Image: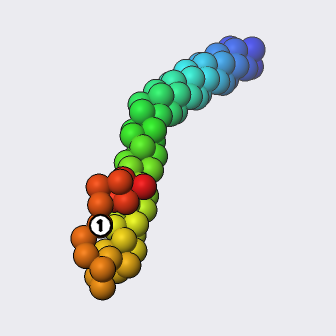
Amino acid sequence: MDTSRTVIREAARTAADEQARAHAALEAQRALAAHSTAPLAASLAVDARLEALRCEQMEKLRQISGEKEAGGKATESEIGQ
């Protein structure tokens, strides 16, 4: 009976060790994924901001061209505003 208990304890200990190693590996993968995706997220944020600025500039150009339709061309200083 002692031998079977020892075998069971050893098997449980081995299973717990394997589970702990698997958990540690999973946490390492999560950390790596978070580290790897951070630059991508930052790049996407920059892209979104650049697109927003481009849209703002296009809207300004539309407004200026609409105002100037009756009176001539927009000046460079008006376009740069």
| Residue shown at the point (29%, 67%) measured from the top left | 74
Mark 1 belongs to which amino acid? Ala
Who is closer to the viewer here, 55 or 28?
Answer: 55
Which sits in the foreground, 8 or 35? 35
> Residue 32 versus residue 56: which sits nearer the camera?
56
Mark yes or no: residue 60 visible: yes
Question: How many numbered circles does the render carry?
Answer: 1
Residue topped by disc 1: 74
Query: Is disc 1 surrounded by few (<14), some (14 to 19) or many (20+) residues within 10 Å?
Result: some
* Res 51 → quadrant: bottom left
Asked whether 48 or 64 is in front, the reply is: 64
In the rendered image, the quadrant that contains the N terminus is top right
> Residue 48: x, y in percent?
42, 53
Q: Which quadrant, please, contains the C terminus?
A: bottom left
Depicted 35 relative to depicted 64: above or below: above
Specify whether 58 is left or right of 31. Answer: left
* Residue at (57% x, 23% y) in the render: 24
Where's residue 58, x and y in %?
34, 66
Task: Give the residue drawn at x 61%, y 23%.
Answer: 20
Q: Quadrant of residue 37?
A: top left
> Given the current orientation, which residue lies at the most extreme left position?
73
In the image, residue 68 lies at what x, y percent? Answer: 32, 77
Extreme bottom residue here?
A: 70
Against 45, is 39 above or below?
A: above
- On the image, the x and y values in percent for residue 15 come to 59, 25
Q: At x 24% / y 70%, what residue is drawn?
A: 73
16 with respect to 56 (left or right)? right
Q: Secondary structure at mark 1?
A: loop
> Height in image: 54 above or below 30?
below
**What colour scheme has been applied to the protein in the rendered image?**
rainbow
**Residue 18 visible in this rendered orientation of the protein:** no
